[in-house]
Image (cartoon, rainbow, N blue to C red):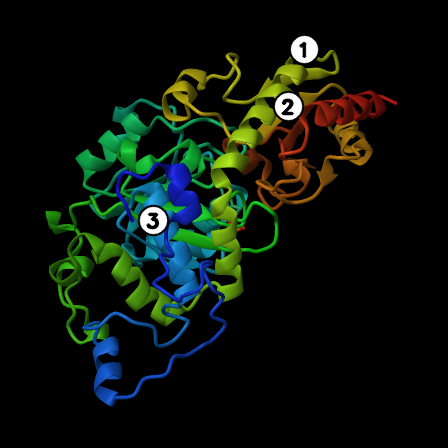
Amino acid sequence: MNPNWKIDTVAVQGGWEPKAGEPRILPIIQSTTFKYDSAEHVTKLFDLEAAGFFYTRLANPTTDGFERKIAQMEGGVGAMATSSGQAATTLAIMNICQAGQHIVTASTLYGGTYNLFAVTLPKMGIEVTFVDPELPAEEIKKAFRPNTRCLFAETIGNPGLNVLDFEKFAAIANEMQAPLIIDNTFGTPYLCRPFEHGAHIVIHSATKYIDGHATSVGGVIVDGGTFDWTCGRFPELTEPDISYHGLEYVKTFGPLAYIVKARVQLMRDLGTPPGPLNSFLFNLGLETLHLRMQRHSDNALAVAKFLETHPLVSWVCYPGLESHPTHDRAKRYLPKGCSGVLTFGIKGGAEAGRKFMESTKLVALVVHVGDARSCVLHPASTTHRQLSEEQQESSGVKPDLIRLSIGIEDAGDLIEDIDQALKASQQ
Ligand SMILES: *Cc1c(COP(=O)(O)O)cnc(C)c1O
């Protein structure tokens, strides 16, 4: 791969580079296992002395093609795909955090991540402190403890759509010697490359824009390769791994230490790989990511501007609007556009919201975002339903909030559909 390729070229041609006579398209290798002629070769594979495939839980050629492409697009050193975005978040944290330790996270999170952090990680002995990402650095730093292992945040907070202050978060992470892990699901590497703004690890729900067509659930962890694991705080990466006959990750793999450990230790033991067919579809999705993200962003901005002037709308939240509190940050970190998700408040509250959702024709009521097709959701009664009212409030979910995930259809058609549904909502 030519390091000068622009992201649009990497999206189409990165990852899989076929040799003479090999398929032009990344093939679907739907096989759990791989054949070898000598025991010695297999031993070397197991000892990580030779590169190759032996079991699809650990690595698979189709998944490898997808991983290489997304790593190149993010500007990272390596990636590991997972069976879901939730698995990516879980493994990204467990790779450097165990019972008795602690993480700090922005409170404005995807509902599933919030539950993982608020309930399930604590059950496993990992304590989590939620911080308002808008607090000054000095306040956020107070949440750190000697056993804090990472700082976590989303590029665009879900569902408040607050664009992260990367500069502040990266400075805190560096000072506290804890890697900054960014969920870049809404940003995608086309709109935002968090490693360029100081992130150390990026995760995605590939289910959303990477797939882009709502066919497959999956996730991926990308390693920026820049965190200094030798700072004395991460013995799991610098000291021998007893589960891998004394392997020392940093010594053996250098900047790839974190992502190799995630694979050979956690994927080996916890086992959440994507299926090869899904990896094929994620790779196919990435081939048009640059085209789709531009259209998602342009359409969402057009819809947001339309809603802002609509008499039946009380407020609109989209980082591409000047009225958004993090609009300046959006200009800095998301210069090409602000992705496809926006929220608004409908006059008439929850009841009008329900009618609106039942009246749209193009925009479908589904629990999803990041799909080529536009969709609508009322988070308080769906994705954030399991949270208490206080938890909903702290993750930015208001009762009258309607979330739109704007697709890549014609913007005029979408606006017409939304307009008629708004009128129907008042009847
Ligand atoms: C959907 C989503 C996840 C979880 O991903 P799954 O693929 O559904 O497991 C995590 N973070 C964000 C921002 C999401 O939108």
Q: Dot 2 corresponds to which residue?
A: 344
Q: Dot 1 corresponds to which residue?
A: 309
Q: CA distance from mark 1 to mark 2?
A: 12 Å
Q: Nearer the viewer, residue 55 or 329?
A: 55
Q: CA distance from mark 3 to mark 2?
A: 34 Å
Q: Nearer the viewer, residue 324 or 36?
A: 36
Q: CA distance from mark 1 to mark 3?
A: 41 Å
Q: Residues within 10 Å of mark 3 (few under 14, many from 20)?
A: many
Q: Is residue 249 left or right of residue 391?
A: left
- Nearest to the eye among marks 1 and 2: give it: 1
Q: Is residue 129 visible?
A: yes
Tag 1: amino acid: Thr
Where 414 falls versus 286 (above or below)? above
Tag 2: amino acid: Phe
Tag 3: amino acid: Ala
Residue 314, picture quadrant: top right
Q: Is residue 181 visible?
A: no
